[in-house]
Amino acid sequence: MAGIVTGMVAIDVTDETFQTEVLDRSAEVAVVIDLWAEWCGPCKTLGPILEKVIDETDGEVVLAKVDVDANPALGQAFKVQSIPAVYAMRDGKVVDGFMGAYPEASVREFVDKLRPTEDERAVDELVAAGDEPSLRLALQMEPANEDAIVALGEVLVADGRGDEALELLGRIPESDRTRRVAAAARVGDAPADDHDATLSSLLDRVKDDDEARQQYVDLLELMGGDDPRTAEYRKKLTQRLF
């Protein structure tokens, strides 16, 4: 439950920003989606209640407002038949919802169910601490917590325990975050230079040498997509392999 946002009452979401502002954000925090329109009287009653109650969560729940007239694709995606319509989303999936202008007590009950539990808050605090004992305690409480696993993996790599980091990362599905830590774990004590000489020397071996190919890919992962050379080196790898 990392990624808590403070000081934000509501986000106005459009067809174009829904992916980033709602779907992606829901991986970090519960998002309540309020589907409304200017002509809708009950929407004007419910809207301020949602804003008040969600603001009181101090960022543990985020409110996303969607004007269905201005954003018809989202109205169709949610198959809206009447408004106001409210949906709660976590990890890209709708987990709860209601239609109509509910009273404040009912809205508060709806929102409270979306807030982190005391255990989840404790895990968040341990991950934020960032030291190895805190991260290991977090994983005792929540063994598959990606934030804790990635953070502990980074600590282990920095301490020269790459094999232990790789074993730890194996607990969860591969992602952009885990790939970078895994690459650092495998590369180990390779010189922190610009990697050009190493990549060039590996290029002749990547087709028939699995270890050379893995090291080549790992170095590109560490360089990252922002490095202008990464795309060119990936192209060279493809040419050698195929």
Image: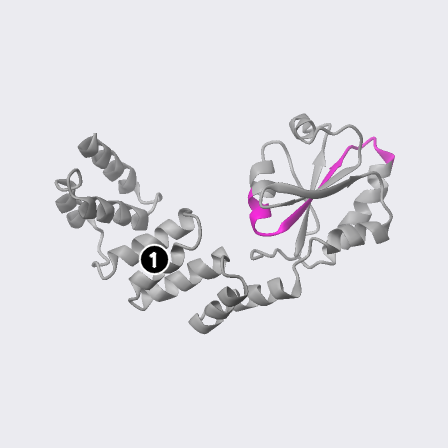
- Asked if residue 29 shows in the view, the reply is yes
| Quadrant housing residue 116 | bottom right
- Name the quarter where the C terminus is drawn: top left
Taking 152 as reference, is 98 above or below it? above
Instruction: Locate residue 110, reporting x and y percent.
Output: 77, 50
* Residue occupying image coordinates x 48% and y 61%: 148
| Quadrant housing residue 208 | top left
- Name the quarter where the N terminus is drawn: bottom right
Crowd class of label 1 (few under 14; some 14 to 19; many from 20; radius 10 Å): many
Residue behind mark 1: 166
Q: Is residue 2 left or right of residue 198?
A: right
Q: Is residue 239 left or right of residue 11?
A: left
Q: Which amino acid, mark 1?
A: Leu
Q: Is residue 33 magenta?
A: yes
What colour-coding does the image apply? Answer: one colour
* Residue occupying image coordinates x 68% and y 57%: 115
* Residue occupying image coordinates x 65% and y 29%: 77
* Residue occupying image coordinates x 67% and y 53%: 61
Instruction: Locate residue 141, reporting x and y percent.
Output: 54, 66
- Asked if residue 52 shows in the view, the reply is no
Q: Is residue 94 magenta?
A: no
Q: Is residue 87 left or right of residue 237?
A: right
Instruction: Locate residue 180, reporting x and y percent.
Output: 35, 51
Task: Label 1: state its secondary structure.
Answer: helix
Taking 159 as reference, is 234 above or below it? above
Which segment is the magenta one?
Answer: 24-41
Instruction: Locate residue 59, reporting x and y percent.
Output: 66, 56
